[in-house]
Amino acid sequence: MRDSGSGFHPMTRRRFLTLGAFGLSAAAQAAVRRERRGEMAYRRLGRTDLMVSEVSLGGSPPPDEPLFSQAMDLGINYVDTSPAYGEGSCERLVGKMIRDRRDRFYVTGKVFAQPGASAAADYVASVEATLERMRTDYLDILQIHGAERATEHQDAEILEAFRTLKEQGKIRFAGLTCHTDPVAVLEPAIRSGHYDVVTIAYNAYLDAQPSGKGTDYLGQCGIAQLIALANQHDVGVIAMKTLKCEKVQDLSAFTGEGSSMAQAMLKWALSNPGVSAVITEMLTEEQLLEDAAVSAQELTEPEARALRRYVAHTSPAICRSCGACARHCPASIRIPDVLRFASYALGQGKPARGRALYAGLPREQSAVACQRCGTCREACPFGLDTPALLAQAHRVLVG
């Protein structure tokens, strides 16, 4: 059932299960396994059979050593890394922190796909460099970092590299992440059988917009079906970009039962049993304790109401990265990427990173190529004024 006043799903985990868990089959629901150890809950990560902490660490950037140690003491046992995070410094820190508990802590590493440009040996060498920086023998999961096209995960050299690394015992499982157009990119990857885990953007904004009453936005943008498909194929799902908390001056109107908006957003993502874990940056003790506290907790109705108000207030500025705009853009602008880079600067306090990534885009794929034709606005399932957001993003990212 949908809240008739807002078009938002204020569902608890129990209600998700009762209503079929976003379309999960009975077999897929049976494969969802949870257990609780102390204050932290763990979920099965698809066919990997790894039991990962519901709340896990993002590595861009990772917490410092004392905070990382505290996170592990709280039961967090999974971290997402990449050689791109701090030019390898994230991998070095993670390797140092997990050295005495390697068999009890799970690490995802990344490789950048360059179909047609890299041989399998190049990908293997990249992973070996990661292992050397981490001073470990293996990665639990190796993911293609930021897959942009369905052809990437079908590349023969990439698949050969994954096979070689598995045979050598240097990786256990394979996966991919996607920031843009996840349905088009990830659906064939899930069906291929080559990948065990996917990491996707998943947050409350995907399920609501101010003017929508009774519209199934999660279904309309295809994310609900994608998560259900992953579960049907026993592919683990990790949620990223869960905390879409834009800066507003007064958050007093957006609280419920004393919980924070970040907690409500994390609970919303975890209320889908098809999601195994959320990864989030926790850079202060306050953030760590705030985020870890949501494990094994349900989203309450007061929290859901507060979240509805917050989403309605900030929704016009939030790109969901569903990719609908980019698929229809006659100029082939990488719209979700441009808006994601702007969010690093505007909402995450990472202006240098956002500007560097934007500077790396070909000019013809950046916001300067926008002719304000409005096609992207018409294609957006969430009614965003995309041309205006692109113009704003360009102003922010060029300094």
Image (spheres, helix red, strand yellow):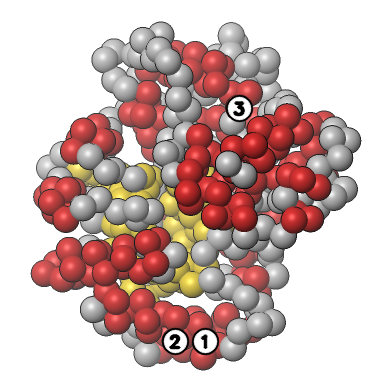
* Residue 387 placement: quadrant: top right
Helix, strand, or loop for circle 1?
helix
In what quadrant of the picture does the N terminus appear? top right
**Circles 2 and 1: CB atoms closer than 8 Å:** yes
Nearer the N terminus, badge 2 or badge 3? 2
Specify the label residue 261 is tagged with: none
Tag 3: residue type? Ala
Disc 2 residue type? Ala
Q: Residue at x 69, y 82 (%)?
A: 116
Residue 317, disc = 3
Task: Residue at 52% x, 64% y: name it.
Answer: 145
Is residue 132 toward the left or the right of residue 82 in the image? left
Is 179 left or right of 99, judged from the image as shown? Answer: right
Q: What is the secondary structure assignment of the residue under circle 3? A: helix
User: Mark 1, residues whose alpha carbon is within 10 Å: few (<14), some, or many (≥20)?
Assistant: some
- Residue 5 visible: yes
Q: Which residue is mark 2?
A: 125
Relative to residue 89, is residue 84 drawn left or right? right
* Percent position of residue 59, x then y: 35, 55
Percent of width and height locating residue 244: 47, 33
The spot of residue 276 in percent (x, y) is 39, 49
In this picture, residue 257 sits left or right of residue 100: right
Upstream in sequence: badge 3 or badge 1: 1
Q: Quadrant of residue 257?
A: top left
Sort mark 3 into few (<14), some (14-19) or many (20+) by Cα contacts within 10 Å. Answer: some
CA gap between label 2 and label 1 equals 5 Å
* Location of mark 1 (residue): 122
What's the residue type where badge 1 is placed?
Answer: Asp
Q: Which of the two residues, 209 or 190, is positioned nearer the viewer here?
A: 209
